[in-house]
Amino acid sequence: VPRSLEGQEVYKITDIIGSEPDLGVENLKGSGLIAGETSAAYNDIFTMTVVLGRTVGIGAYLVRLGQRTIQKTTASPIILTGYQALNKLMGCDVYSTNDQLGGPGIMYSNGVSHLAEPDHLRAVTAAVEWLSFVPSARGGLLPITDIRGIDEIERPIDFCPSPNTPYDPRYLITGCENEDGKWLSGFFDKGSFQEALSGWAKTVVIGRARLGGIPMGVIATENRTAEAIKPADPADVKASEAVIQQAGCVWFPNSAYKTAQAINDFRTEDLPLIVFANWRGFSGGQRDMFDEVLKYGSLIVDAFVAYEQPVFVFIPPYAEIRGGAWVVLDASINASVMEMYASKGSARGGVLEANGAASVKYRTKDLIVTMHRLDDQLKSLDAQLEATEDSETLGKVKAAISDREKSLLPVYEQIAVQFCELHDTPGRMKAVGVIEKDVEWRDARTYFFWRLRRKLAEFDLRKKMIEAAEVGRGVKAMAPLEASALMKTWFVASPGMTEAMWNDDKIMLQWMADNDKLLEDKVLELTKNCVIQEVYQVMTAGGNTAVIGTSGIVEGIALACEAMSQDEQEKFKAMLKASLQL
């Protein structure tokens, strides 16, 4: 800008734009654009980052925005600022390598990196194996593997946990060898399980596996105590490494977040999901409440609400779901895709554990009342107490009653606990409608394979029905459960089919295969009916809506006729005359 200096006109430089692009904030705008597109891409396509070298600044954010990350264990830090710049900022050499800031010891342990591999080849191999579980496009067909020669579809599950004995929950998924070296098969196909995020929040196990060749997401509860390690920051001279013991069968802030993160990843991979649930609840102590366990627990519900593929929540043998843990897993969260099951006989579910319920609902005074109602000796002593007037005898009877109550109390306490536990059984869960079925663990693989196949076929037809109904703004969109109910009426109306057969997965699959052409015709008929209803609503709406709508329909028909061939026009005119009886 022009200025006057000592009587002379000079120019003051206020801004330097430069002749070359990409010198300053325009770089940051471009980075913001990339960040926004990467975030949106997570829901639109399969996103993954394989980190094989240093990733800095916006690059580090893009790694996280893509969510799925495979990090090489050497010379591949994910950082915001290099260690030299931080040392200069603090005025001393605090950090010696970038790995202290964003190496696998940090990023694999905090859940940013899903997998850590030692070299380029293994990192790329892990990426290819991950891709083998995912459809080639969002909403596409699942990549089903031929497992002949590897495993059998309809086989029993050999591994079964023992009551009150901690075990590795991965054995439920993969199977294991027993003490004699004999292989005990698990739920999924042998050798198909690929675990992810194993360095973070170790009280939950997540990964991908195949059931009869069909890829699935899987989440399981760690029932053993795990350690959470928080490293000491070299920049803080007072800091020290913290090792926190985390009990099994409990959701902590990090493990709740890991569960929600896994559900979202499986959703955007279009994978069906099974949860082997064994949670007693959320950790509600002061530290965990401060660390936002409530927030991360809520994210689990958010993730289930958005899920579109089949979800099975299964309580394994000798496992339990209690209190708040049940709330975030209940099938009513997203009834159109979620179903709950329990292992026959040994699974448990309830608000409180049996001991806690008994201490609240069956206190000592209530037990004493029950004793006097049921025990013959106490009933006899009560009769003597009423009939006795002598003070000395009265004292003896009261003492005898007190002694009898003390001797019976431990027995009745056990009975009370057992009585409360019988309210938590799979039989009662099924009776009150909170689970679909109690399944024998040994037969669970076969049952869920056919259930999964049926659900995938049902969801595919249901999707076509919903899309068929989305033809006009005036017709209410068909909800997924409404589509399933309509499908059921088609099934029951078929010759030889009954309402009871609807729950038989094999019969349902066979019916869909035998009536493929009929079902296509019914979907087309559904589309036609929705169009009819739309036109009818517009033309009978009354007022300006009817006038404008009718005019729009006539003009639309006229435009469509102009685009038709001569033969098509003649056929259309004949159809119009027949329908309107002109």
Image (cartoon, rainbow, N blue to C red):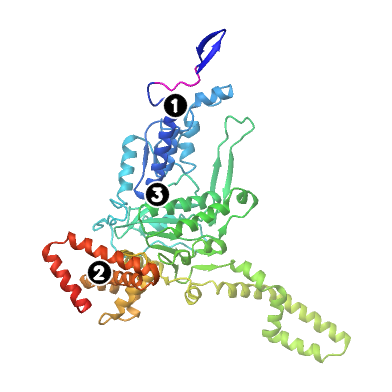
Which segment is the magenta one? 13-18
Tag of residue 195? 3
Specify few, some or many for label 2: CA neighbours under 10 Å numbering under 14, 14-19, or 20 or more: some
Can you tell which of label 3 and label 2 is closer to the viewer? 2
Q: Earlier in the sequence, mark 1 or mark 3?
A: 1
Location of residue 475 in the rendering, given as x and y in whole percent from the top left corner? 36, 68
Q: Which of marks 2 and 1 is nearer the N terminus?
A: 1
Residue lying at 59% horizontally and 69% vertically, measured from the top left: 354
Contact between marks 1 and 3 (CB within 8 A): the answer is no
Residue that carries the numbered disc 1 in the rendered image: 24
Specify the quadrant of the image occupied by residue 442: bottom left
Tell which of 21 and 166 is nearer to you.
Answer: 21
User: How far apart, in angstroms, are the residues tagged by discs 1 and 3?
Assistant: 42 Å
Within the magenta stretch, is there residue 314?
no
Specify few, some or many for label 1: CA neighbours under 10 Å numbering under 14, 14-19, or 20 or more: few
Under circle 2, the secondary element is helix
Residue lying at 45% horizontally and 52% vertically, measured from the top left: 205
Residue that carries the numbered disc 2 in the rendered image: 524
Query: Mark 3 belongs to which amino acid?
Result: Glu
Specify the quadrant of the image occupied by residue 523: bottom left
Tell which of 157 and 326 is nearer to you.
Answer: 326
Within the magenta stretch, is there residue 14?
yes
| Res. 176 visible in picture | no
Query: Mark 2 belongs to which amino acid?
Result: Leu
Q: Relative to 368, is 197 above or below?
A: above
